[in-house]
Image (cartoon, rainbow, N blue to C red):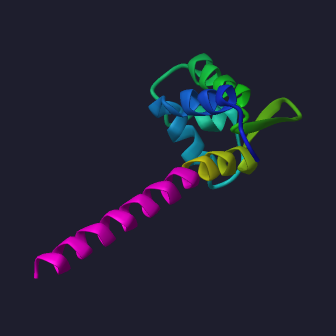
Amino acid sequence: MVESQEQLSNLFAALADRTRRRIIARLADGPLTVGELAEPFDMSFAAVSKHVNVLDRAGLIERNRRGRFIECALNPLRLKALSDWIGDYERFWDERLSKLEEVIKEHRRSKS
């Protein structure tokens, strides 16, 4: 899935905050309600809800109503989009570093 620059910026901005990264890490074990997400944090429920809203707008999580509760779950497709984008640059640098290694080896052989 190719992301626009704006979509990528929103994803990275959402993940720039430590609390939001911790929320994502907690959701890796499965869906949780907003109340359950708020439990380990030393902040108000409203503050955690704001973080959840940012993650939702970035598409990193999905929210579903379960009776009186709102359950949050990771959106694996958005995480894959980030992984794919990073993977492109990983391949780029792997190729560049491999070429540099070849040049260094050739230089060493020519000096011998």
Query: Magenta stretch: residue 93 in it?
Result: yes
Look at 32% across and 63% down and name the residue there: 100
Query: Residue shown at 24%/69% (left/top)?
Result: 104
Principal secondary structure, stretch drawn in magenta: helix
Q: Inspect the magenta stretch and tell me whether residue 67 lies in it.
A: no
Residue 17 in picture, x, y percent from top left: 48, 29
Q: If the image is split into quadrants, where does the C terminus sit?
A: bottom left
Q: Position of residue 18 (x, y in %)?
A: 45, 33
* Front position in the image: 94 or 82: 94
Query: Is residue 29 toward the left or the right of residue 96 in the image?
Result: right
88 above or below 32? Answer: below
Which residue, as the protein is rendered here, is positioned at the far right?
67
User: Looking at the image, which residue is at 65% across and 24% down?
Assistant: 54
User: Relative to 85, is 98 above or below?
Assistant: below
| Magenta residues, start to end | 87-112
Please determine whether, in this image, residue 27 is positioned above or below residue 107: above
The x, y position of residue 31, in whole percent, is 72, 47
Q: Residue furthest left?
A: 112
Is 107 in front, or is 5? 107
Nearer-the-camera pick, 24 or 94: 94
Image x and y of residue 37, in percent: 61, 37
